[in-house]
Image (cartoon, rainbow, N blue to C red):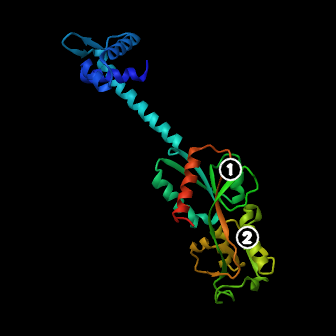
Amino acid sequence: MEIRHLIYFQAVAKYLNFSKAAKSLNISQPPLSMQIAQLEEEIGVRLFHRTNRKVELTEAGYYFNSSCDFIINLLNKEIDTTKKIHAGELGTIVLGFSGSAVYDILPTIIKEMKLRHPNLNIVVEQHTSGEQEKLLLNGHLNLGILVPPVSNEKIKFLPINQEDFKLVLPLDHEYSKLPEPIDLSILKDEDFIMTPEESGKGYYDSVISLCNNAGFYPVIAQRAQEQQTIISLVASELGVALVPNSSTNIINSDVVFKSIKQQYKKTTALAWHVDSQSPGVKLFRKLINNLIDTGKIK
């Protein structure tokens, strides 16, 4: 039995006339009659009473007709679901993100993805850039929003945006009232609060480079992974910090953010495993490119 047998049967059941049913199917009547006869032979019961004057469904035919509705509708639904999975519009994407992305690009990306592909389930997990690289390699994450570079050649990435750094000072710090931009060289004797190097080499190296360009190596007094924690530690007067511009969205009345003279861009990128064949990953990358091209993320 093939699906066409069910479609042919339903057409005859609808019109109770072989000629009209054949016309609706764009086939001639003899092949239609032959297909119905084959169906009845395979099932082993008569589905129609046929006379020279009319065609009627048998009791078994009535039941089979209702079953055909269910079977065909279910099949069409499953075909549609299969196509959506193939197109990446259905299923689950596990997306990693780090630090300041949650205050900047992540909300835009998630909002646009849900708007354009509402049936795609997105699970977000916060991890450091270093952790994301490992989770992409072992397949736990489908995608990651991290700070390059990455150490493994199997991880590919697409730069999403770049942002400047800001200096964070305690509200009552002696430099908090200085005019901007601040020359970092005046901070050579200050205690710095930084992320651990293993959490993300790209971010860590950016801060070190900024300080080196100002003529000193920072005294690292405290380490914290989260931007919110770093800013809270600055508010507690445990040191100063250099954070991405997006972290200025974190509200804390006990700190001030200052622009700096030395310039160094922090890059954020979308990363994935080079062997990933997931349609959802390809769809996500296409969306990111579109958001970049339209200026919705920059």
Please, what secondary structure does the residue beneath circle 2 have? helix
Above or below residue 133? Residue 166 is below
Position of residue 288 in the picture relative to residue 131 (left or right): left
At a point 32% along the width and 14% down the height, the residue shown is 30
Q: Which amino acid does label 1 sit on?
A: Leu
Position of residue 187 in the picture relative to residue 168 (left or right): right
Q: Name the residue under label 1.
A: 136
Please, what secondary structure does the residue beneath circle 1 have? helix
Above or below residue 227? Residue 43 is above
The answer to whether residue 148 shows anywhere in this view is yes
Label 1 environment density (alpha carbons within 10 Å; few <14, some 14–19, many ≥20): many
At a point 37% along the width and 22% down the height, the residue shown is 6
Q: Name the residue under label 2.
A: 206
The answer to whether residue 123 shows anywhere in this view is no
Label 2 environment density (alpha carbons within 10 Å; few <14, some 14–19, many ≥20): some
| Front residue of this view, candidates 294 and 272 | 294
Position of residue 146 in the picture relative to residue 16 (left or right): right
Image location of residue 42, percent across then percent down: 41, 12
- Classify the position of the N terminus by image quarter: top left
Image location of residue 252, percent across then percent down: 58, 77
